[in-house]
Image: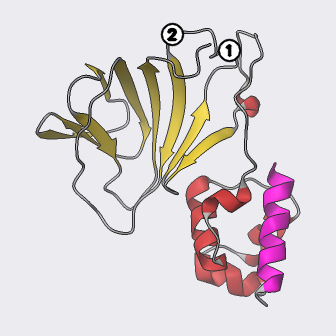
């Protein structure tokens, strides 16, 4: 997948008449790093890819192929098997943390929440089930009923989804969480 992202960046950059140095300066990366990225020799974080996509005039989703939910029946999922399975509003990048979600009651996910250009007050919503969230990186804003809480790395919350709730990133840095919820909409 990284080769493909690098190739897409190079194609867009060349089509826009940009040099490696020009693009690098615009997104605060070295030309050498971008060259390695374009050749598939290094990795890139989603928040940096977001900056590149904005400069190249495409949505972040342009770089990801559509990923189908895996229906493998293996118990273990290796870190290198994780793939983006959904991108919501160019802000929430979802990764499944299981190869076997179609016959389970809960859905484990890792979610990268990218910063927004403009901060908005989070509005709570409710649905059936329950949720557990654990903050790995960054700062998460959690709304429960009419209260707003700030969660830091290592903090967690476990609640019934029938309560009015929501969460988001009100900072200028990426936030990464583990979210486990029920019901499982992928269950067959």
Residue 140 visible, this angle: no
In the image, which residues are magenta? 1-15
Q: Indicate left or right for 109 with 10 as reference.
A: left
Residue 69: give x, y in percent of width and height: 69, 28
Number of other residues with Cα within 10 Å of mark 1, as a class: few under 14, some 14 to 19, many 20 or more: many
Residue 82: give x, y in percent of width and height: 69, 33
Q: Quadrant of residue 149?
A: top left
The local secondary structure at tag 1 comes to loop
Q: Is residue 12 magenta?
A: yes
The residue that appears at 53% across and 29% down in the rendered structure is 109
Question: Toward the viewer: 180 or 172?
Answer: 180
Residue 155 visible, this angle: yes
Q: Quadrant of residue 56?
A: bottom right
In the image, residue 5 above or below residue 132:
below
The residue that appears at 26% across and 60% down in the rendered structure is 120
Q: Quadrant of residue 40?
A: bottom right
Residue 37: give x, y in percent of width and height: 79, 63
User: Which residue is denoted by mark 2 in the rendering?
Assistant: 105
Number of other residues with Cα within 10 Å of mark 2, as a class: few under 14, some 14 to 19, many 20 or more: few
The local secondary structure at tag 2 comes to loop
In the image, residue 17 above or below residue 93:
below
Q: Indicate left or right for 173 with 88 as reference.
A: left
In the image, residue 184 above or below residue 147:
above
Question: Toward the viewer: 32 or 70?
Answer: 70
C-alpha gap between disc 2 and disc 1: 11 Å
* Majority SS type along the magenta span: helix
User: Which residue is denoted by mark 1 in the rendering?
Assistant: 100
Residue 187: give x, y in percent of width and height: 58, 15
């Amino acid at each position: 997948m990284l080769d493909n992202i690098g190739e897409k960046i190079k194609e867009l950059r060349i089509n826009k008449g940009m040099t490696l140095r020009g693009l690098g300066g615009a997104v605060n990366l070295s030309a050498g790093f971008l060259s390695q990225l374009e050749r598939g020799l290094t990795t890139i974080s989603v928040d940096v890819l977001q900056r590149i996509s904005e400069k190249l005039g495409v949505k972040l989703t342009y770089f990801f192929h559509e990923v189908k939910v895996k229906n493998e029946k293996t118990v273990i999922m290796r870190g290198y098997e994780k793939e983006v399975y959904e991108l919501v509003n160019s802000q929430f990048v979802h990764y499944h943390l299981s190869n076997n979600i179609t016959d389970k009651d809960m859905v484990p996910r890792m979610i990268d929440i990218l910063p927004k250009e403009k901060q908005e007050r989070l509005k709570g919503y409710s649905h059936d089930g329950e949720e557990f969230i654990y903050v790995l990186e960054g700062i998460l804003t959690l709304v429960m009923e009419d209260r707003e809480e700030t969660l830091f790395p290592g903090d967690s919350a476990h609640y019934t989804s029938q309560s009015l709730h929501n969460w988001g990133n009100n900072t200028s840095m990426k936030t990464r969480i583990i979210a486990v919820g029920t019901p499982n909409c992928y269950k067959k």
